[in-house]
């Protein structure tokens, strides 16, 4: 049995990249950027008004001003602003030559159709200057980042309509066990619905990879061999849930070894998730995840998600918060790294969700994150600052 840190290092050292592809930027949401994106122009591309008002020379604010023209957004100015002159201007319109400020409509008084007076007590420039946001050639998006909705706007603004992104790894998901039935089937005695596979498929999608559900491998070594062999041949990563403990029918490790998988570890000193197996094959990376749904969920987040992101060129760093613990809590044993699902109170304190163990999948629906207990640490006191990892 190895520590979690050792397991993490082994998994991340085993990463291979899936390459890149070029897609239209409108399809790039949540993909991992594989290029540096530079601006093809200054932004703004010209000096522009940030309010509706009148463009003039600041030194003429105390005078009655003649209105030369009206400048709408998208229309080029035709007149030069000179002494005691101004141009009516709309938000976003180009500033006319000669003007060095814009005063707002709210600070103006029309004298007649052709003249206006400034009535304010002071005024900002109300100008957005050429290049003040971005200069031609500036890097606007860095390689390796996950593309967010606001980044789609940036891609559009700089004309990057075709963008290079990391290819999605193909991840096969297999559930194992005679007791497993699909969700549309009502379980009989000693049966349980297959929640793990669909949970993992959703986690794979959230991680930006491409999931492929392969079905249920029954407690039959020949059938299990066939389904895992097919998954390895068609995928970059294979996730198998169940069949990795110490029972008579838990033969997943021996099957994957027969298929040419070199097992690098089969036990982690962690709770939940101790019976987690990981191995490498010339074609794919293979995980044997615990059958209990909380265990499989957490081990995916801790080990599989960072791996998938790395395959696509992204260094995954989970969001964490440092917050006070809202109660005192003790666990029964401290011989393993312990992970516990938690929620946040209205006051911003960390509280333990009702949690009956690694089979209690509904506990995760109430959780916003997990906290960890170091080996040898049994208790967290009320008010103690803890690190919450978002899930």
Image (spheres, rainbow, N blue to C red):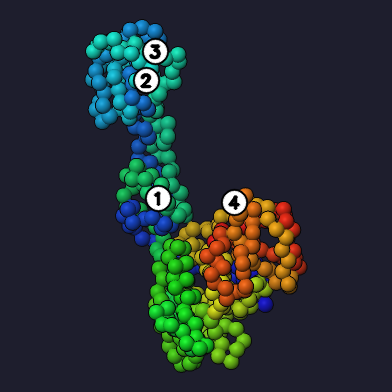
Q: Earlier in the sequence, mark 2 or mark 4?
A: 2
User: Which residue, given by chain and number where applicable, does mark 1 sit on?
Assistant: 149
User: Which residue, given by chain and number where applicable, does mark 4 sit on?
Assistant: 346
User: Which residue, given by chain and number where applicable, does mark 3 sit on?
Assistant: 119
Give the class, few, some or many, for how many residues have Cα within 10 Å of label 4's Cα (few <14, many ≥20).
Answer: few
Please state, as top left, top right, bottom left or bottom right, where the C terminus lies in the image.
bottom right
The answer to whether the residue labelled 4 contacts the one labelled 1, judged by CB atoms less than 8 Å apart, is no
How many circles with numbers are drawn on the protein?
A: 4
Q: Residue at x 52, y 58 (%)?
A: 315
Q: Position of residue 196 (x, y in %)?
A: 49, 75
Disc 4 is placed on an element classified as: loop
Q: Residue at x 34, y 20 (%)?
A: 105
Q: Nearer the viewer, residue 279 or 367?
A: 367
> How far apart are labels 4 and 1 at the CA level?
29 Å
> How far apart are labels 2 and 1 at the CA level?
35 Å
Q: Where is 227 relative to 355, above or below? A: below
Give the class, few, some or many, for how many residues have Cα within 10 Å of label 1's Cα (few <14, many ≥20).
Answer: few
Q: Is residue 390 left or right of residue 19?
A: right
């Amino acid at each position: 049995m190895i520590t979690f840190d050792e397991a993490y290092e082994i998994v991340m050292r085993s990463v291979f990249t899936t390459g890149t592809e070029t897609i239209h930027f409108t399809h790039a949401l949540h993909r991992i950027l594989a290029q540096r994106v530079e601006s093809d122009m200054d932004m703004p591309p010209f000096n522009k008004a940030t309010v509706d008002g009148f463009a003039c020379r600041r030194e003429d604010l105390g005078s009655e001003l003649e209105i030369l023209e009206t400048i709408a957004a998208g229309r080029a100015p035709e007149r030069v602003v000179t002494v005691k002159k101004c141009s009516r201007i709309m938000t976003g319109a180009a500033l006319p030559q000669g003007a060095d400020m814009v005063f707002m409509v709210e600070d103006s008084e029309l004298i007649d159709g052709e003249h206006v007076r400034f009535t304010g007590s002071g005024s900002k420039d109300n100008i957005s200057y050429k290049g003040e946001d971005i200069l031609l050639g500036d890097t606007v998006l860095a390689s390796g980042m996950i593309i967010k909705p606001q980044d789609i706007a940036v891609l559009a603004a700089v004309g990057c309509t075709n963008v290079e992104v990391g290819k999605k790894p193909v991840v096969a998901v297999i559930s194992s066990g005679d007791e497993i039935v699909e969700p549309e089937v009502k379980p009989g005695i000693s049966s349980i619905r297959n929640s793990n596979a669909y949970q993992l498929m959703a986690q794979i999608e959230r991680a930006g990879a491409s999931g492929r559900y392969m079905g249920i491998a029954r407690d039959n070594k020949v059938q299990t061999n066939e389904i895992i062999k097919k998954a390895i041949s068609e995928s970059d990563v294979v996730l198998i849930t169940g069949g990795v403990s110490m029972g008579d029918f838990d033969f997943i490790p021996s099957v994957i070894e027969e298929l040419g998988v070199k097992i690098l570890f089969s036990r982690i000193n962690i709770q939940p998730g101790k019976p987690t197996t990981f191995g490498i094959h010339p074609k794919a990376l293979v995980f044997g995840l615990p059958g209990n749904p909380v265990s499989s969920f957490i081990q995916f987040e801790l080990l599989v998600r960072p791996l998938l992101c790395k395959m696509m060129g992204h260094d995954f760093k989970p969001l964490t918060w440092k917050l006070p613990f809202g109660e005192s809590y003790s666990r029964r044993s401290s011989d393993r790294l312990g992970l516990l699902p938690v929620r946040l109170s209205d006051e911003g304190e960390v509280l333990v969700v009702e949690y009956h163990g690694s089979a209690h999948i509904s506990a995760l629906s109430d959780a916003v994150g997990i906290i960890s207990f170091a080996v040898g640490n049994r208790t967290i006191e009320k008010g103690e600052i803890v690190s919450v990892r978002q899930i």
